[in-house]
Amino acid sequence: VSFDGDRIVAEIQAASENVARFEIYQDGILTNIRQRIDETSILTARRLPGARWVSLLARDAAGVVSLPISADMGVDAKGNPTTRVLIVGVNTYDDPGIPSLNYALRDGGRFAEALSSVKANMPPVETIDYLKDTRATPVAILEKVDTLLSGLGKGDHLVLYFAGHGLQDENDRFYFGTSDTRLSDLTGTALAFSDLARRLEQTEARITLFLD
C-alpha cells in the first residue's frame, strides 16, 4: 500500500484463486470494492477527510474474509471530518407507570463535558446539542437529528446519546420514553426507534449510538 497525495494505491497479488473481491476500509468505513480480475490487481481510493488508517482485505465467494493488511496514512493535513453530537436526557415522566430517574440528566451532562474536553490530537466536535426532559419530545428529537445530519457525508460522524427509559410494546417494537410518554399510547407519545432508524439509513456518515 502506498500513498500519492490524497490517493491510496494498493497493489494486490491474490494467493488463492478463490478470492472474489478486494475491499478497502478507512478508519473502519468501507470505501471501495474491486472485483478480482486476475492474479495481480491495482486498487485505488480517494482518502476520506481526516482518515488515519487504511485496511485492505480479500473476500471469497462464500464470504470468508482474509486477515486485513493495514497502514497508517498519518495525520491528514487537509483537516478533520465533521463530528456532531446530540444528547437526549429524560429524568421526569408524567405517566405514574414510568418511574422518574435521578441521574439521566447528570449522565448526559457528563458525556457533553467529556466530549468538550477531547485531547488536541483527537478530531474536534463541531456542535453538541442537548435536549432535556420536556424539551426532548419525539418531534424535537427527530427534527434535531435531521438538522445534524444535513451536510454530513462519508467520513463524517454523528454521535447520539440517549439517557432515559427504553420501552417495548406488545408487538416487540422499541421506543425511547419522553416526559409526556403514556404507556397506553406508546405509538403516539414515545420516540419509536424505527422512526430514528429510517433517518439514519439515509446517510453515509458514521453513526455512533449510546443508550444509557
Image (cartoon, rainbow, N blue to C red):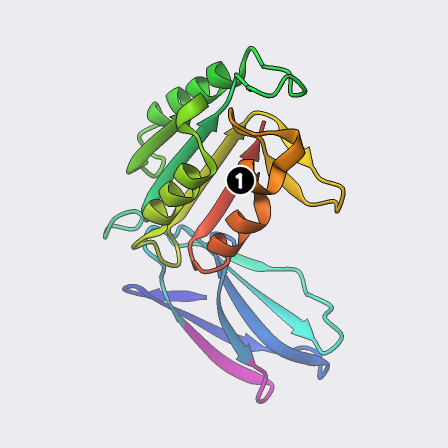
Asked whether the viewer can see residue 132, the reply is no
Q: Residue furthest left?
A: 78
Q: Residue furthest bottom?
A: 38
Asked if residue 19 lies in the magenta stretch, the reply is no
Amino acid residing under circle 1: Leu
Residue at point 52%, 31% (across, down):
162
User: In which image quadrant can residue 63 be found?
Assistant: bottom right
- SS for tag 1? strand
Closer to the camera, 16 or 190?
Answer: 190
* Residue at 57% in and 60% down: 69
- Left or right: 128 with respect to 166? left
Residue 136 vs residue 18, the one in the foreground: 136
**Residue interval drawn in magenta:** 35-44
Magenta segment includes 38: yes
Q: Residue under label 1, please give it.
A: 209
Tally of numbered discs:
1
Q: Could you say where residue 125 lies in the image, as x and y percent from the top left?
A: 32, 36
**Residue 164 visible somewhere in the drawing:** yes
Residue 2, given in percent of the width and then of the height, sits at 40, 66
Considering every residue shown, the one lying at the far top of the view is 102
Quadrant for the C terminus, please: top right
Is 189 rendered above or below residue 201?
A: above
Image coordinates for residue 51, horizontal then vertical, percent: 38, 52
- Vertical placement of residue 198 versus 176, above or below: below
Most foreground residue, 89 or 135:
135
Q: Quadrant of residue 130?
A: top left
Q: Position of residue 189 (x, y in %)?
A: 54, 36
Side of 29 where 14 appears, left or right: right
Q: Quadrant of residue 159?
A: top left
Q: Is residue 132 above or below residue 46?
A: above
Which residue is painted at 49% across and 32% down in the image?
161
